[in-house]
Amino acid sequence: MSNDPSHGDPSYSANAPQGSGPSHNGPLYLEPRLAPRTAALLASPALLHTLVDALGSPLNVILPDQIADNVRAFRAVFARHRLSGRIFYAHKANRSSALVRRLTTTGAALDAASLTELRHALGSGFTGAEVMATGPKDPEFLWLAARSGTLVNADGPDELERAAALVRAHGLPRLRVLVRLSGFEAPGARRLSRRSRFGTSVKSLHQLLEVLDRHRAHLEPVGVGYHLDTTSVEEKAAALEGCLHAMEELQVRGFHPEAVDVGGGFGVSYLAHAAQWERYTTELTRAVAGARPPLAWGGHGYGLRAENGTLRGALGLYPAHRPTAGPGYLDELLSHPAPGLGRPLGTLLLEGLHQLYAEPGRALADQCGLTLGKVLEVRASDSGGPPLVRLAMNAGDVALEDHGVLVDPVVLPRPPVPAAAGAPVAVHLMGNLCLEADLITRRAVFLPRLPRPGDLLAFANTAGYCMDFGATRAQGQPLARKVAVHREGDGDWQWCLDEQYWPLTRTGEAQG
Ligand SMILES: *Cc1c(COP(=O)(O)O)cnc(C)c1O
């Protein structure tokens, strides 16, 4: 299959002697963080096996009630800072209907980034006023957004012109717009925030104001915002402060903006244990440096490489264990001093009487679903390396690694489960495509026991981007079906196809 040098190496096995120090022995687990609802579902393996037997592998399982809990957690942060505003779920994180429909009952709003997402939101029960249209917009998307009265998060002056023209041509009510800014600069430091293809540079704000001024009859600016794809609180703090200044500029021009939109990117912590993450990344670095045998297929280093004995590059991985993520990250941002004004950003928003808008995608989808793959074959490696475990799924079906997220799957053995405990083992997870590159994970994954054909591997916490964002029908392999599961209290799990889910009881009453 490959002449990968890592293959001849027995030290993947937890039991293999290493000789290079005690800290490097034993399995390098990266155990997933499991919220109580996810843990409870994984504790019901019979149900999960039945679902895969009936609906095939891969299978995506959605937990719609979790997103309601996540909305509550974000809202608590707003309350803590005494801010009013809105939480817009960034729909692009997942195509699930159950999640979108469940959201309609939570008071949250939705961020639609395409015509299809906007239609989905409207058809799921959101009103136009509860939706924000973001991203660059094709004419049909912009038309339906204007027509249905969504808030248009404008990427630039051209989009504002086109929106105004639509409103005029079709005699629509004044359209609420928010302008997306980018290219913020922290005062003092000459460090620009990272370049973005989206939004308009704050330096060109005057251009946006000129367009807005000309179209007062058709456009109503309700605020300004940003979305930065970074984990850096400093960068976001500079952007938020930049937005506060932009709000003043709008007021000076006689507009009455009311909201600052801090975008998404609050992140998720995927791992249960910080220590496992530290240890894994340390050992990965050592492996690339040649101080221990490779940890990944073909000696892949996730961005690190050794050149003539020197370690180069940087780990290009998502920080899979994060001490602060999601609502906690928003809390941190709001408590952070504005780089120029010095006072906490939350306080400045409050004193400016501004509402806060946020657009979490990944963080609202946290623990909202998992992906199941069935083990088809377990084969010893030709060269004595980790056994190859072939799954009825491919890398596009569970795109954790595509997003740089390293986290172990949970093994759900097919009953009857063997009485013997089994020993920890490293394996390579192979996908179902005839493609050398179709590895579910490029690294060897340590599991508490060798799986057997028929077992399920459960990839926890895939709802944010890792479930259906990049899934394809390559080679005619099936796209994963999606089921929604929920239960009242500690009652039995109920399930239905994702598209059959509505936030109603089986007799048609509103769900509690
Ligand atoms: C993708 C996106 C988001 C969501 O980002 P997350 O990292 O998933 O929170 C929010 N706003 C905009 C404009 C986006 O493009």
Image (spheres, helix red, strand yellow):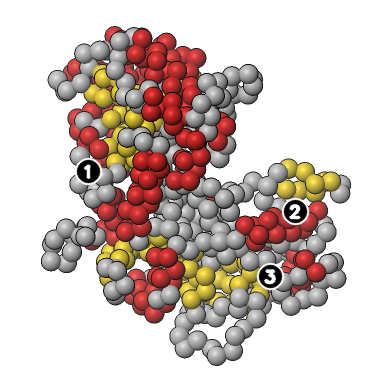
**Residue, disc 3:** 27
Q: Which mark is residue 101?
A: none
- Whether label 3 lies within 8 Å of ligand 1 gets the answer no
Task: Say which label, 3 or 2, has the lower sequence index.
Answer: 3
Residue 6 placement (x, y as % from top left): 75, 64
Q: Hey, what amino acid is under mark 1? A: Phe
Q: CA distance from mark 3 to mark 1?
A: 47 Å
Residue 404 position (above or below residue 424): above
**Residue, disc 1:** 126
Q: Residue drawn 76% across and 48% down? A: 305
Image quarter for ligand 1 equals top left
**Residue, disc 2:** 285
Task: Say which label, 1 or 2, has the lower sequence index.
Answer: 1
Instruction: Report whether 46 appears left or right of 285.
Output: left
Residue 67 placement (x, y as % from top left): 35, 53
In the displayed image of the protein, which residue is found farthest to the bottom?
419
Q: CA distance from mark 3 to mark 2?
A: 16 Å
Q: CA distance from mark 1 to mark 2?
A: 48 Å
Where, by quadrant of the figure, is residue 214 drawn?
top left
Where, by quadrant of the figure, is residue 192 drawn?
top right
